Amino acid sequence: MAVRFDDYDPDDGRIDVSDGTNAHTILSFLAENPDIGFTPKEIHEQTGVPRGSVGSTLARLEEHGLVRHKGDYWAVAEDDRLGSVVAMNHSFDAFAAYTDRYADNDDWAEDLPDLDENHDADTEA
């Protein structure tokens, strides 16, 4: 996704874990095995995330408290932050999917009901 370079802030406090991202893929895999630690190589082999991306993705996830590690082994975090992040991303996805019926309809004004209270009285008189 392209961004306005002058406006881009990589430290905006959010991490994208939406469907299709490396972060989502890794978190999904680790969440399926919450009590097991995996090496970055094993995570790559199990998820298909490019080997060169696994380490940096794990580091970003750790910065946000979504994963933990001991030595070379990584696992999903033990607290409920993962659920909060997933819920937040579902909200963002739902909002992005919302379509504005009026924005998609150039003739939207013609579709509005006539709310003039006097309209019926004027036509009957």
Image (cartoon, rainbow, N blue to C red):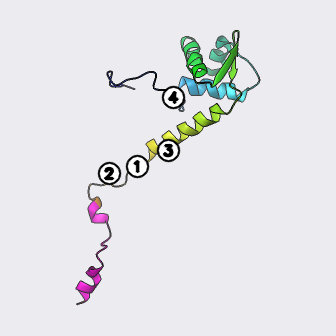
Q: CA distance from mark 4 to mark 3?
A: 15 Å
**Residue situated in front as seen by the camera: 62 or 20:** 62
Question: Mark 3: which amino acid?
Answer: Ala
In front: label 2 or label 4:
4
Q: Is residue 88 above or below residue 68?
A: below
> Within the magenta stretch, is there residue 121?
yes
Q: Residue at x 29, y 83 (%)?
A: 120
Callout 3: SS: helix
Q: Which residue is mark 3?
A: 94
**Residue situated in front as seen by the camera: 36 or 8:** 8
Relative to 72, 95 lies left or right: left
Q: Earlier in the sequence, mark 1 or mark 4?
A: 4
Callout 4: SS: loop
Which of the image's four quarters has the C terminus?
Answer: bottom left
Q: Residue at x 27, y 64 (%)?
A: 110
Q: Earlier in the sequence, mark 4 or mark 3?
A: 4
> Within the magenta stretch, is there residue 67?
no
Picture coordinates of residue 43 (x, y %)?
Answer: 65, 17
Picture coordinates of residue 23 (x, y %)?
Answer: 56, 24
Residue segment shown in magenta: 109-124
For label 1, the crowd category at 10 Å Cα-Cα, with few meaning under 14, some 14 to 19 and many 20 or more, is few
Q: Earlier in the sequence, mark 2 or mark 4?
A: 4
Q: Which mark is residue 99?
A: 1
